[in-house]
Image (cartoon, rainbow, N blue to C red):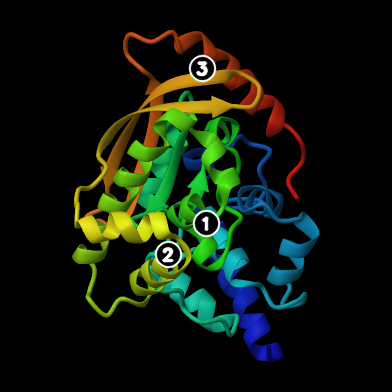
Amino acid sequence: MGSARHTELGSFLRSRRERVRPAELGFPAGPRRRVPGLRREEVAQLAGLSVDYYSELERGAGSQPSEQVIAALARALRLTADERDHLCRLADRPVPVQGGDASHVHPGMLDLLRRLTSTPAQVITDLHVTLVQNPLAVALLGDQSGFRGTRASFVHRWFTEPEARQLYPEADHEVQSRAFVADLRAAAARRDARDAGARSLIGALLGLSAEFAALWAVHDVGFRRDDRKRINHPALGLIEVDCLNLFSEDGRQRLLWFTPAAGADSAGLFDLLTVIGTRETSGPAR
């Protein structure tokens, strides 16, 4: 990446950092704050980066940021889609395809996610790519956001990687498989027929999973809106939850949040989940 682009990228990051109001992201805005907006270490914490690396980016130095780092910075700085695209171009990275594993998360969804502090919540795409999770969602489901390519879709992992199915009891696997396929067919139909992301995912699954191919041939269709799920937690055992969805205007992203299932003995387990989530996220940012 050329030095001029490096310098422009650093200046752009600094300008966006200074624009964000700390209180909007839960940081104190007291009299000891000597800089407008966020501090560098706060941006690094939000993006999951080291302070040294982020500081180098602002200085116009450091290595070229990856697409995943750009996506994390866009979320941390509450960039608009146009600003995220501009950041990609300054870093000489391709603008991500909407619905992929580096998709831009609308700032409004991020704000809602931040406010859901007492319940597990995450933002996923319509192809079941996890974009961002709050600490309680990581504590409940594990970190689902580190996968790339077709593996970024939980539907792909569900039909191709047996360990992905450990999340749900074996008795629920058939129901989950049917629901995943029906939801994916609905999502693919809503997208343009030439959409590369949906075509690539479906084509890969048809070639890799006989179970998926058989269910796909049935032509069931239906978005997952409100689900009751039983989740196998490695420390807490079986947790029964209600999963609710809020769809973006174009349907390509969903905010999912989980509550103790009504009538089930899960509320106490959710209290323990809060302890686990706090413990697992109390260390310093990477």
Which of marks 2 and 1 precedes in the sequence? 1
**Mark 3 sits on what residue?**
270
**Mark pair 2, 3: CA separation:** 34 Å
Q: Amino acid at mark 2?
A: Leu
Check if mark 1's residue and mark 3's residue have beta carbons within 8 Å. no
- SS type, badge 2: helix
**Mark 1 sits on what residue?**
160
- SS type, badge 3: helix
Which of marks 3 and 2 precedes in the sequence? 2
Which of marks 3 and 1 precedes in the sequence? 1
User: Circle 1: is it few (<14), some (14-19), or many (20+) Cα within 10 Å?
Assistant: some
**Mark 2 sits on what residue?**
205
Q: Position of residue 23 (x, y in %)?
A: 51, 38
Check if mark 1's residue and mark 2's residue have beta carbons within 8 Å. yes
- SS type, badge 1: helix
Check if mark 2's residue and mark 3's residue have beta carbons within 8 Å. no
Residue at image point 47% right, 53% down? 159
Q: Position of residue 42 (x, y in %)?
A: 65, 48
Instruction: Specify whether residue 250 is in view.
Output: no
Q: Choose between 157 and 252: the one closer to the eye.
A: 157
Instruction: Specify whether residue 99 is in view.
Output: yes
Q: Is residue 282 left or right of residue 176?
A: right
**Mark pair 1, 2: CA separation:** 8 Å
Q: Position of residue 36 (x, y in %)?
A: 58, 53
The residue lying furthest to the right in this view is: 52
Nearer mark to the viewer, of 1 and 3? 1
Nearer mark to the viewer, of 2 and 3? 2
Q: Choose between 200 and 278: the one closer to the eye.
A: 200
**Mark pair 1, 3: CA separation:** 30 Å
8 in relation to 106, above or below = below
Q: Amino acid at mark 3?
A: Phe
